[in-house]
Image (cartoon, grey):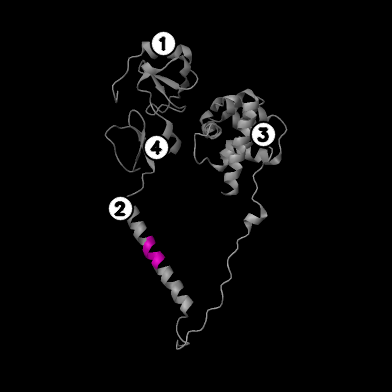
Amino acid sequence: MSQFENFKKDILLYYEEELAKGTLPEPLMMPTPAGLRDYALALSASEMTLDDHRVFKTFFDLEKKYDSLSEAIDRSDRDRLIPVQRFLMRTTISPREGVVKLAAILVDYPNRPFRIDAEARKITSPTEPPAEPIVGEPSVGIPRNKKIYLLILVGAVVVLGIALALNLANPPKSCMVWTGERYEKVDCTVKLASGNPIIPLDEDKLAHFQKIMRTDTLTRWSAGKIWYAQINRKVEFYTEAGTHPVKTDRGLRLATEYMIHKYAGRNSTTPTKGE
């Protein structure tokens, strides 16, 4: 296991131990993107180490367009904190390095910042014994070890060429489109009859963002865990925060118990697929 994998594991173990003790700040007891952003904003106003400040600045102000860290956090979209929430709740497999480092600061993990040990930086390679002379081999021409190197090089070029040709023939699906219930991967150059916008691939949204089709199954316990938007006088519920998948200028709102009672549960009219 790599040092960074150990770092991630230790952060989660520390977080869960503190969670069990009940010593964590309220925004970390049941983390939400909005709560984590507000907590990060509060931390930015306190005294921070240079390393912590650098992690915050990189995470919240990649474009370097804000005069202060607090302004960058305050103006950031709360969706930016969704990967941090998922990391702490163990619902993501491979979080980005910046997500892990920010989580370490939020939970006040003591063994930060992450550093690669000096031993891990050393690149060692076995010493090759000198090649034994081959009886009867002429001393002119390409040496044996260079011949092997050239053969490997030519083979690599051939494999690369084949891979490139296959890639051009079958371009990777690095975009996605809304199907009415969830996102699906598509080729970025495809034209769809639905007219739904084709957007860059987001693995998190692809895996987790869905429209809740059976709204009659929602209860008051769903409040604070799902999101909604009112489109054409109809209320739609979704599993994750973000913008509406079709009306992309409309942001989703956190569903309250009132909204679920009024528009879901027993008062729901379950739509048909694709509606």
Q: What element carries label 2?
A: helix
Give the labeled residue for mark 2. 169
Q: Please say if 25 is above or below 90.
A: above
Q: Please say if 154 is above or below 60.
A: below
Rendering coords of residue 165 (x, y %): 33, 57
Give the spatial CA distance, label 1 vs label 2.
51 Å
Q: Nearer the viewer, mark 1 or mark 3?
A: 3
- Secondary structure mostly seen in magenta is helix
Q: Magenta segment, which residues?
A: 155-160
Give the labeled residue for mark 3. 108
Tell whether position 156 is magenta. Answer: yes
Give the spatial CA distance, label 3 vs label 2.
49 Å
Q: Nearer the viewer, mark 3 or mark 4?
A: 3
Q: How crowded is mark 1: few (under 14 residues within 10 Å), some or many (20 or more)?
A: few
Give the spatial CA distance, label 1 vs label 3.
41 Å
Q: Which mark is residue 199?
A: 4
Tell whether position 4 is magenta. Answer: no
Q: Is mark 4 on a helix, strand or loop?
A: strand
Give the labeled residue for mark 1. 262
Looking at the picture, which amino acid does disc 1 mark?
Lys
Give the spatial CA distance, label 3 vs label 4.
36 Å
Q: Please say if 120 is above or below 267.
A: below
